[in-house]
Image: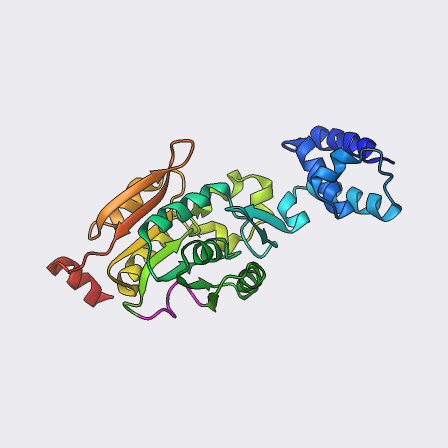
Amino acid sequence: MTVQTALLQGTKLLEEGGIGVPRLTAEVLLAHALKRDRVYLFAHPEHELAEVEWIHYGRYLHERLNGKPTQYITKVQEFYGREFRVSPDVLIPRPETEHVVEVAKSKGGVRVVDVGTGSGALAVTLQLEIGARVWATEISPAAARVASENARRLGAEVDVIVCDLMEAIASGSMDLVVSNPPYVPLSQREGLQREVRDFEPHVALFGGPTGFELYERIVADAARVLRPGGWLVMELGFGSYDRVRSMLAEWVDVSVEPDLAGIPRVIAARRASFSSPRSHSCEHDL
């Protein structure tokens, strides 16, 4: 079987199976089976698949038809122009999260922590883009290993710490806190695409019964971890802006950045350089 025929058959199977962008998916999976770049497929449509190549391609098509995301099959996902390794232990980095990088870069800082790093996409990217000293926290040891490997492979100096949110980060030690926290309410589980619901790690998806539980904890602890004047930058879930904005009543210079669809995607806020009586009381309670 030639590359051209394999692509035609794979595209037809994926299309009949209701898989989005079937031609592109077939190309990515066939290139992965051949251990080649996609451009090779266009340059060599007459290439005859070896038996092992056809077996791998057929397996990849079967996995995708059963809902497994393409990125978990190929084990890679591009983010901010770099190739990150991914596994079912980590959330697949989304293009929308690149807006977090843009906002965080505009705030600067020499000491940065990425809370709930997953694949390490934010931590690694920020370290390489702004040259900051970066820490990354992750509650899942398996995900932390993925982040550490991505940092090593891409040449980023990132210290990955296994802990719950920022419990291992010293008070007043950071200039910038970034996070793409789990924000899907548990009640919305059944409404998710099967690729997300059945394959991506639930610890990285669901933020609790309301979806705001992790936001509340991050905002509260960021006030402890940040130096006066430091910045908190977080990705927003759909429809979450008003609720998250209300959590930042004691913060200053609060702003929101929309994504390309005009949906509020990133919220940024600066820790005040002084504490009002009210905020001092809250910090004392913490």
Which quadrant would residue 230 be assigned to in this image?
bottom left
- Where residue 243 sits in the image (x, y, percent)? 30, 44
Please state if 209 lies on the left or on the right of 275 as rendered: right
Which span is picked out in magenta? 163-170
The correct choice, above or below, for 161 with respect to 106 in the image is below
Instruction: Name which residue lies at 29% across and 69% down.
Output: 171
Question: On the rendered image, what quadrant is the N terminus found in?
Answer: top right
> In which quarter of the view is residue 26 placed?
top right
Using the rendered image of the protein, determine whether residue 242 is visible from the camera's viewpoint: yes
**Count of residue discs:** 0
* 220 or 101, nearer to the observer: 101
Q: Position of residue 207 (x, y in %)?
A: 42, 51
In screen coordinates, is 108 left or right of 40? Answer: left
Q: Quadrant of the C terminus?
A: bottom left
Instruction: From the viewer's perspective, tell me whether residue 56 is left or right of residue 88.
Output: right
From the viewer's perspective, is 111 left or right of 72?
Answer: left
- At x 35%, y 41%, the residue is 240
Q: Residue at x 25, y 50 (%)?
A: 248
Q: Report x, y in % for residue 65.
A: 70, 39
**Relative image position of residue 261 (x, y in whole percent):** 42, 31
Question: Magenta region's main secondary structure?
Answer: loop
